[in-house]
Amino acid sequence: MRIPCPFCGLRDSSEFVTIGEASMSRPPADAPEAQIFDYVYLRDNPAGVNQELWYHAQGCRSWLKVARDTRTHEIESAVLARGGAQ
């Protein structure tokens, strides 16, 4: 799988580390235990395009939001996770 980095161009996925879904947000430290359990252990596994966070560890060290089809691994887009270039 090749990921189009906005700074480095098309790169092999082995240069990146993923942390999963981009739409999830960490609950606050004082959140109920059940909410923290859900955040850590319960994940959707959608078939189709999913927004994911990827870190370009072996390149420019940028965080990217990648739109990837979970059925085919086809990358539709990759943009900086906090605004910026596409």
Image (cartoon, grey):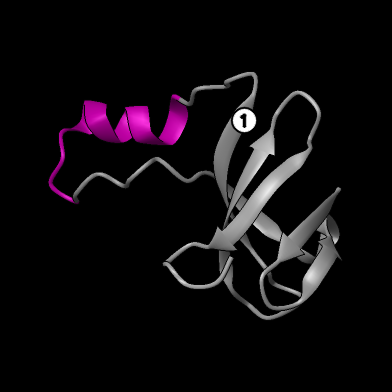
Compared with residue 17, is residue 34 higher up or lower down, i.e. above or below? above
Q: Quadrant of residue 71?
A: top right
Q: Is residue 30 above or below residue 10?
A: above
Q: Quadrant of residue 20?
A: top right
The x and y percentages for residue 81 are 48, 62
Range of the magenta residues? 29-42
Residue 30 at x, y percent in the picture? 12, 47
Q: Is residue 84 left or right of residue 54?
A: left
- Amino acid type at circle 1 is Val
Relative height, residue 85 to residue 12 (above, below) = below
Q: Residue at x 78, y 35 (%)?
A: 73
Q: Residues within 10 Å of mark 1 (few under 14, many from 20)?
A: some
Q: Quadrant of the C terminus?
A: bottom right
Q: Is residue 57 left or right of residue 40?
A: right
> In the image, 63: left or right of 29?
right
Q: Which residue is depicted at the point 64% across and 18% down?
A: 47
Residue on which the image places disc 1: 49
Q: Look at the image and say whether residue 76 sits in the magenta stretch.
A: no
Residue 40's x, y, as percent? 42, 36
Q: Main secondary structure of the magenta part?
A: helix
Most foreground residue, 52 or 84: 84
Residue 39 on the magenta span: yes
